[in-house]
Image (tube, rainbow, N blue to C red):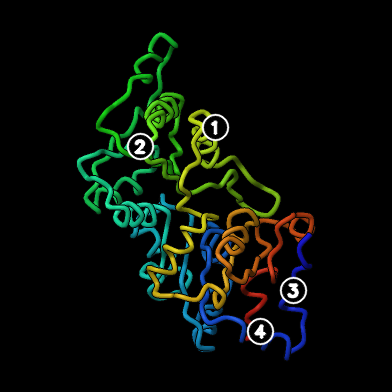
Amino acid sequence: MESTPVDVTNISPEEFQNFLNSFDHVFSDCDGVVWRFRALPRVGEFFDLMKRHGKTVHFASNNSMRSQENYEAKFKDAKIENGFQHLITPSVAIAEYLKTANYNKKKKIYAVSCEQTIKVLESYGYSCKKGPDVGYENFEDHIEYLQDDPEIGAVVVDNDLNANLAKIQRAVTYLKKPDVLFLGGATDRYVYHKQGCSALDCGIFTEIIAAESHRDPIILGKPGKLYAESAMRKEGVTDASRVLFIGDLIDQDVGLGKAAGFKTLMVLSSISKEEMLAHKIRPDYYADSLASIVPFL
């Protein structure tokens, strides 16, 4: 079992200063940390104070579904300047991975993904195939989705709320060829609306496709180490040991921090203290919220 997380609002001034001195860069999740439906209290103030302490501030979300306009409105509501410019999502990490890997643009990408992920991929010059958005009504139509498509060179699975059996079958069919890349974005099995209230999330589709294709996806969302490296590269950060990652979920956010070598701070907006302490993965630090830390800054 890992060491007991430290409540940063219940330590001495000297210990709190040591906490501040232990990092130079802050990377933060968005949903559940900065906002829920609206901006959470005093979040803009928290990040402003971090900057006054000489920290750089960045954001890393698993939510590729939001448009730039939506993200910018969210950051504005939270009173955070230039938040979108310092944000990475799985869609961007996936596109950057393909670019670095010199993916053959003559090959198409089969996207079991939200529209925004497809838009990002297309903005990088990649051609995508998708669908069907409406599945078949009987199994006599099933055979259509067992046919290979030689144009497909990669399967991307990221935040598709409209995934269905036909899409999953197509992805599994294409992944039978070992040279077809399998890239995964968000891995979240659950979405949290508040502490103790969750619903199934799109990560389950990635798990199904992986199990049925007997392939492990290259994860370019949290908690994948490649996602953390992509975020650091985008923001010009080179030393993972000097990064503090703030999140509200253990598997995605704390898991990312552990994989990357970041220090981790968890806010208890989605997970209770009891759940946090019972988990095999533990953050280094925790607090009820960012607002609860502001008086100490």
The kind of residue tagged 2 is Asp
The x, y position of residue 70, in whole percent, is 38, 58
| Figure quadrant of the N terminus | bottom right
Q: Nearer the viewer, mark 2 or mark 4?
A: 2
Position of residue 104 in the picture relative to residue 247 (left or right): left
Q: Mark 2 vs mark 1: which is more N-terminal? A: 2
Element under disc 3: strand
| Position of 104 relative to 60 (above/below) | above
Q: Mark 2 vs mark 4: which is more N-terminal? A: 2
The kind of residue tagged 4 is Pro
Q: Nearer the viewer, mark 3 or mark 2?
A: 2
Mark 2, residue position:
179
Q: Mark 1 vs mark 3: which is more N-terminal? A: 3
Mark 4, residue position:
295
- The residue lying at 44 percent from left, 11 percent from top is 139
Position of residue 62 in the picture relative to residue 11 (left or right): left
Q: Dot 4: few (<14), some (14–19), or many (≥20) neighbours within 10 Å?
A: few
Element under disc 4: helix
The x, y position of residue 7, in whole percent, is 74, 74
- The residue lying at 51 percent from left, 58 percent from top is 225
Element under disc 2: loop
C-alpha distance separating marks 3 and 2 = 47 Å
Q: Mark 3 vs mark 2: which is more N-terminal? A: 3
The kind of residue tagged 1 is Ala
- The residue lying at 51 percent from left, 70 percent from top is 27
Q: Nearer the viewer, mark 1 or mark 3?
A: 1
Mark 3, residue position:
7
Mark 1, residue position:
211
- The residue lying at 27 percent from left, 39 percent from top is 128
